[in-house]
Amino acid sequence: MSEEAQRSSGVTIISVRGEAFVEVAPERATVSIVIAVDGPEKSAVQQRASDARNQCISTIRPMSDAKAGPVTEWTASQLQVWSERPWNADGAQLPPVFHSRSTLDVTFSDLDAVGAWTDTAAAMDGVTIAGIDWKITDLTRQELEGRCSRDAVANAAAKASVYASALGLGDVRPIEISEPAASQPEYGAVSRMVMASAGDPTEFAPKHIRIAVQVNARFEARSAD
């Protein structure tokens, strides 16, 4: 309907953006570790790196159960070994230095077990905790995205009704619902580490994960007369 036709028919178009969000505690934690060893002898570097990698994996296997946890999934990269010949300040090339690197990603469903395992892993030769990714399950995410989508539409409808009422209009009807360009639900979480007492495992206090949805909506409203 053209603007002129809308005016002549007493129809007013109201365009609004609806928003909704929810915050929930994470359900999964994926710990990423890097095993890196350096040294002048290839065989020694390779052996140290292999030992550290096997030691890490040996702590994961007893905890691994896809349904019961506390570890629901884990992956390990292959061990990589390479060398380089550095130069000193005088421009002379030095003997080769050998490097080894591998990574492990371990997903926990029991978040209370994360601190104790990261403490154990971090104490191993060449192991560094690269990061922890706090997540919710796919099922939970789908459910919450659906809830937020419904709430965002309801929020848009409520806004349109307020505007219509302020203009003395009634009979608000939706004519178009769309998502903003390149829109997708937002979600993410950041954690902080809580210092534990001596002998106690490190505790993590992850922030709640926020899922937010926006929709663009157009409504038509007619005169209340």
Image: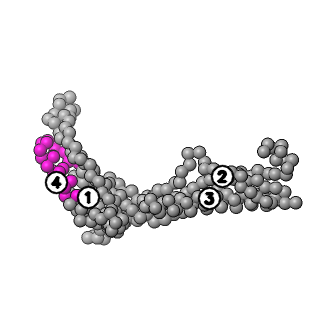
Give the secondary structure at mark 4. Answer: helix
Q: Position of residue 152 (x, y in %)?
A: 62, 58
Using a 10 Å C-alpha cutoff, classify the residue at mark 3 as few (fewer than 14 neighbours), some (14 to 19) or many (20 or more).
many
Compute the Cα span from label 1 to label 2: 50 Å
Residue at numbered disc 2: 177
Instruction: Tell me the quarter of the image containing the N terminus.
Output: top right
What is the three-letter code of the residue carrying label 3? Ala
Which circle, 3 or 4, is nearer the viewer? 3
What is the three-letter code of the residue carrying label 1? Ala
Residue at numbered disc 3: 152
- Specify the principal SS of the magenta part: helix
Residue at numbered disc 4: 51
Q: Which residues are magenta?
A: 36-57
Compute the Cα span from label 2 to label 4: 58 Å
Q: Position of residue 5 (x, y in %)?
A: 83, 45
Which circle, 1 or 3, is nearer the viewer? 3
Left or right: residue 70 versus residue 181 is left
Which circle, 1 or 4, is nearer the viewer? 4
Using a 10 Å C-alpha cutoff, classify the residue at mark 2 as few (fewer than 14 neighbours), some (14 to 19) or many (20 or more).
some
Residue 3 occupies which quadrant of the picture? top right
